[in-house]
DNA sequence: AGCAAGCTCAACCATATGGTTGAACTTACG
DNA sequence: CGTAAGTTCAACCATATGGTTGAGCTTGCT
């Protein structure tokens, strides 16, 4: 997991987190967790045009979170959990680090309150 | 944890993930895991002006990831791990969901390959 | 008092983002 | 064959983002 986190290029993480930083795209991801969906199905519940939704899908694709297969005139999208795992790995790695830091601070506070500030 | 993920407003998540979607800001967070740092210290290793770095810190603050305390003319920043936990919670919640989905697909594939595609 | 340090603020700029609309292309179907 | 369905593409627009520079404000030091 640490390896995973370290091997991620900054640009990849930029794209990943940016892909997650929009409610419409997160909504798509959540629904894609249930089943594969076409562009039209993905766009339907969203308050925007199909073209706009299509752009969001393209961003998800670029980030690696979603993959598309063209079936006739329909573009079927499915989740790519591996990419998501990369973002989770980054967070988990540093989250652990931060928690250790927190624990250390708490220890310090317990033993010698004057040094905690 | 589920509660945590559900209680997050979309706007908050937008801000959180957006804050994480820039290498300079992630670098700041990583270094803030070690110790508190001033704006100047945060900006020093980055290839940008102090003013630019200051803007990044402001974005981190707005997302809740960092908190600042003014000590004289120095602005000291420290990590706010709770906010980070929110992002992690969101990812973890859906990651689990996605993994279950993956497992289900694998099962399907094992028992009846024709239905898996 | 006077000056340097540490930041913020405002103005500005280029490019990215997120949306729209209308035209075009490919595929399915009667 | 003709037409509707499902998408993309291109042009356009407003606003956001990420950077710069220069001025200005506090605070600390001598």
Image (cartoon, coloured by chain):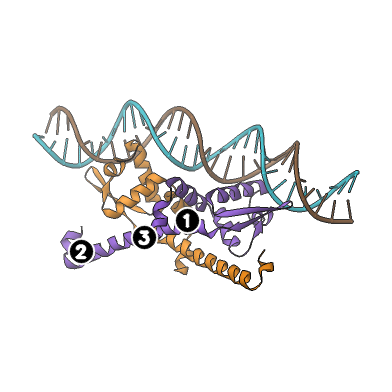
Chain colours: A purple, B orange, C brown, D cyan
Above or below, C3 relative to A8: above
Is residue A90 visible to us here?
no
Task: Estimate the x, y position of residue B67 in percent, counting from the top left.
Answer: 32, 52
> Which residue is tagged 2?
A108
Q: Quadrant of the N terminus of chain A?
A: bottom left
The chain letter for the residue carrying disc 3 is: A
The chain letter for the residue carrying disc 2 is: A
Judged from the image, the secondary structure of the residue bearing numbered disc 1 is: helix
> Which residue is tagged 3?
A95
Rounded to the nearest whole Å, what is the CA distance between mark 2 and mark 1?
Answer: 32 Å
Rounded to the nearest whole Å, what is the CA distance between mark 1 and mark 3?
Answer: 17 Å
Task: Estimate the x, y position of residue C4 in percent, counting from the top left.
Answer: 18, 32
Task: Estimate the x, y position of residue B106 in percent, counting from the top left.
Answer: 58, 68
Residue at 61% in and 71% down:
B110
Is tag 3's residue or tag 2's residue first in the polypeptide sequence?
3
> Which residue is tagged 1?
B13
């Amino acid at each position: 997991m640490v390896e995973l986190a370290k091997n991620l290029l900054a640009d990849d993480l930029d794209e990943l987190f940016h892909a997650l930083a929009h409610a419409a795209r997160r909504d798509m991801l959540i629904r894609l967790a249930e089943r594969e969906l076409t562009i039209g199905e993905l766009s339907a519940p969203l308050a925007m045009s199909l073209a706009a939704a299509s752009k969001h899908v393209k961003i998800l694709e670029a980030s690696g979170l979603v993959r598309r297969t063209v079936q006739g005139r329909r573009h079927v999208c499915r989740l790519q959990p591996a990419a998501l795992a990369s973002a989770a790995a980054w967070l988990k790695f540093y989250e652990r680090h931060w928690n250790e830091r927190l624990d250390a601070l708490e220890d310090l506070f317990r033993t010698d309150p004057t040094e905690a500030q």
